[in-house]
Amino acid sequence: MPSLTLGDFELSIFSDGTYPLDGGAFFGVVPKIMWSRKVTADQRNYVQAGLNSLLIRTGKQNVLVETGMGSKLSERMIKFYGQPAQLLANLAAAGIAPENIDIVINTHLHFDHCGWNTIRDKDGKIVPTFPRAKYYAPEGEWQYARHPSERDAISYIPDNYDPLVQSGQITLLKGGEEIVPGISVKTFPGHTAHMQAVIVESAGRTACYISDLIPTTAHIDLTWGMSFDLYPLQTIESKKQYYAKAIQEKWLTVFTHDPATPWAYVEKDEIGKMAARKV
Ligand SMILES: [Zn+2]
């Protein structure tokens, strides 16, 4: 489990496992002859995608950003994605029980980002996985998720969030809020209209969980977006905005779907090409 210190905070990556994604869909309009230099595809053209959650130990709270794919997938979805579901075991191996999580933040509500928000108990009832936690998610995402388009309806599983909205355990965010001192959210439209990145600042250092705006280190070029993005031109604008801050101020970027490099510094080389400098 990769860990590092950011100012007074300790940051760790916990994975929910990996899952296969069609390489063409993952890289949108980028030709395979280009993306296959960065990632390998199997005979069916699938590449492996990671499911990286970020745990921030502030000294006062344990804050978990994103909860992977979880354990409630339908049979049909398991056929496509398998059932990785390793997040709780990986947290437990580091001595972290669900009761130890104080805050859960979802950047958006696609099923591979909030799957462990809830679990089915013995009687089949949907209950919060992290019983003591306060949950946070973008309000616009939740509104959209109630009436998604035909194109991305499959990505929204109401059991991941509706029970928490009904019980009041989740707080819906407009974007821009500070959740605890040093941890705030900012809306970056493109992948969805309301996706929020999580910005972590401590003692003059900054990290950002940029989520599906830049899902892996192979996606750092401005025009390398996923075909899942609902607003591809906004993805490019949001990436420009992000890089203007993140490169200048040397932010650590956390990549949600990169199975090999969960975090890196994005830099611009002499010819203006983006590169990921490993930690
Ligand atoms: Zn997504």
Image (cartoon, rainbow, N blue to C red):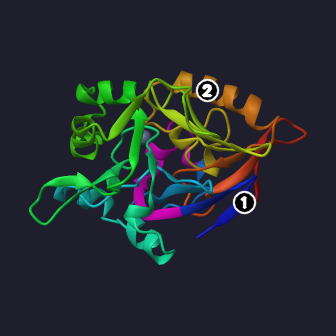
Name the residue rendered at 53%, 50% in the picture: 256
The image shows residue 166, relative to residue 87, as above or below, that is above
Task: Locate residue 259, reporting x and y percent.
Answer: 54, 62
Picture coordinates of residue 255 (x, y %)?
A: 59, 50
Quarter location, residue 44: bottom left
- Closer-to-camera residue (45/155): 155
The residue pinned by badge 1 equals 5
- Judged from this view, the residue extending furthest toward the front is 60
Identify the element where label 2 is drawn. Answer: helix
The region drawn magenta spans 14-33
Residue at the extreme bottom: 93
Please tell me which residue is depicted at 23% across the width and 25% down the height of the picture: 147
Q: CA distance from mark 2 to mark 1?
A: 27 Å
Quadrant of the image containing the N terminus: bottom right
Count of numbered marks: 2
Circles 2, 1 touching at the beta carbon (< 8 Å): no
Residue 171 quadrant: top left
Residue position for label 2? 238
Q: Look at the numbered disc 1 and give the secondary structure of its residue.
A: strand
Determine whether, in the image, residue 208 is placed left or right of residue 196. right
